[in-house]
Amino acid sequence: MKVSLPPGGEKKVLLHSCCAPCSGSVIEDIHKAGIDLTVYFYNPNIHPQKEYLLRKDENIRYAKKIGIPFIDADYDAPRWYELTKGHELEPERGERCGLCFEMRFVRTAEYASLNGFKVITSCLGISRWKDFDQVTRAGVKAASLFPGVSYWEFNWRKNGGANRMTEISRAENFYQQQYCGCAYSLRDTNAWRKKNGRELIEIGKDYYAQEKTLESPCFVGISPLTSLPRF
Ligand code: SF4
């Protein structure tokens, strides 16, 4: 996909990445555009740690293959739970997700500010299971806290981006996560599976090369915009 120029025509970008499948085509597009790209992995929302490490290691593998720097940030999960306290029962795309995006983007923007990046962006909005506008609002808000840092609002999902995401995931045989990431999304996806007679999630089991159907990364199983039952 041909990408527009980042804000201010910048040629150096810090990409917040949540996982290899969601970032694969974004990394490819930005790299091919001749932009100096660094991947920033800060995702303390991911639970359990085994899943966190699986997602991170796949992302490191792909960044190494492309030859771009990868910043491995903290796994400060207790802070994530503190920040999302009181929002445990909300469905996806609710307030908890907004807080979760903001937490990750604020740390990304802070790193950018301290390390000479003027532009940050994210692949979180590429998944059709995410509210693109909610992701963008969080990115813009986070960047605004650090003078001189802007959020690049490019929609990586459009113009074939979502299809390319799946192609790369299959070609690279990425680990295929079955839920968004946090303990609450794991709980809710399993509750949906149980209700629909499907087997519960087994961490570390699924990889793209084995998949039989075209599914989007990050969240497989619950139809978009379905409100999950409250527990
Ligand atoms: S469902 Fe996903 S975006 Fe929402 S809080 Fe959990 S990990 Fe974050």
Image (spheres, helix red, strand yellow):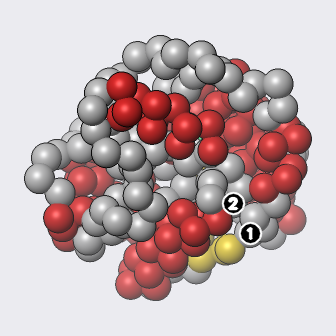
83 sits left or right of 39 in the view: right
Q: Image point 78% across, 67% down: which residue?
A: 74
In this figure, which residue is indicated by the disc labeled 2? 42
Measured in 3D between alpha carbons, the distance from the residue under mark 2 to the one under mark 1, in whole angstroms, is 5 Å
For mark 1, does the 10 Å Cα neighbourhood hold few (<14), some (14 to 19), or many (20 or more) residues?
Answer: some
Q: Could you say which is closer to the camera, residue 177 or residue 14?
A: 177
35 sits left or right of 72 in the view: left
| Disc 2 residue type (three-letter) | Tyr
Q: Image point 27% across, 32% down: which residue?
A: 197
* SS category of the residue bearing label 2: loop
Total marks placed: 2
Q: Image point 58% across, 33% down: which residue?
A: 135
**Residue 103 visible at all:** yes
Question: Could you say which quadrant of the image residue 102 lies in?
Answer: top right
Q: Is mark 1 within 8 Å of ligand 1?
A: no
Q: Is mark 2 within 8 Å of ligand 1?
A: no
Q: Could you say which is closer to the camera, residue 37 or residue 6?
A: 37
Measured as percent of width and height from the top left, residue 67 is found at 45, 84
Measured as percent of width and height from the top left, residue 90 is found at 65, 21
Q: Relative to 169, is 54 above or below? A: below
| Disc 1 residue type (three-letter) | Ala
Q: In the rendered image, which quarter contains the C terminus?
A: top right
Measured as percent of width and height from the top left, residue 145 is found at 87, 39
In this figure, which residue is indicated by the disc labeled 1? 73
Q: Could you say which is closer to the camera, residue 169 or residue 90?
A: 90
Q: Relative to 24, is 123 above or below? A: above
Question: Could you say which quadrant of the image residue 85 lies in?
Answer: top right
Is there CB contact under 8 Å for labels 2 and 1? Answer: yes
